[in-house]
Amino acid sequence: MPTILETAYNAVDDKKGQDIVVLNMEGVSLIADQFIICHANSERQVQAIAREVADKAAENEFEVKRVEGLENGRWVLVDLGDVVVHVFHKDERGYYNLEKLWGDAPLLNMDNGQ
């Protein structure tokens, strides 16, 4: 059975999330163990990625604690507890620059057999 991180990552990848980054937040933040950050080129695609993450999590019996920002499709946050997924519109990602904000969090490589 896939982990919540694998489930969320694969959902983002399946919906063609761009420049997917996974930050290991353990010991860096109390918010979550991992952040997944990606972007899309339109509000509709941002919404589709976020919905896919929530749907796949629910299908695999992981709790979806909340989804914020879905209406606007500019920055959608999907809170899965230990994993928080940030789906940005490409124009917003550089502005918020979460990778720099959490620059002390190590990157996780998700290419291992996935």
Image (spheres, rainbow, N blue to C red):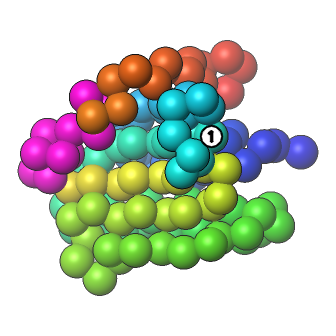
Find residue 66 and report its horizontal and vertical position in percent: 54, 75
Nearer to us in this view, 30 or 23: 30
Above or below, 28 against 14 in this view is above
Q: Which residue is mark 1?
A: 33
Q: In this picture, which residue range is highlighted in magenta?
A: 90-100
Find residue 84 and report its horizontal and vertical position in percent: 53, 52
Q: Look at 66% across and 50% down and name the residue there.
A: 82
Left or right: where 30 falls relative to 45: right
Above or below, 3 against 78 in this view is above
Nearer to us in this view, 80 or 40: 80
Q: Main secondary structure of the magenta part?
A: helix
Q: Is residue 9 visible from the viewing direction of this image?
A: no
Q: Look at 35% across and 76% down and name the residue there.
A: 70
Q: Quadrant of the C terminus?
A: top right
> Helix, strand or loop at disc 1?
loop
Q: Look at 68% across and 40% down and name the residue there.
A: 6
Residue furthest to the right? 1
Left or right: where 69 falls relative to 25: left
Find residue 37 and report its horizontal and vertical position in percent: 39, 42
Find residue 59 and report its horizontal and vertical position in percent: 76, 68
Q: Quadrant of the N terminus?
A: top right
Q: Amino acid at mark 1?
A: Asp
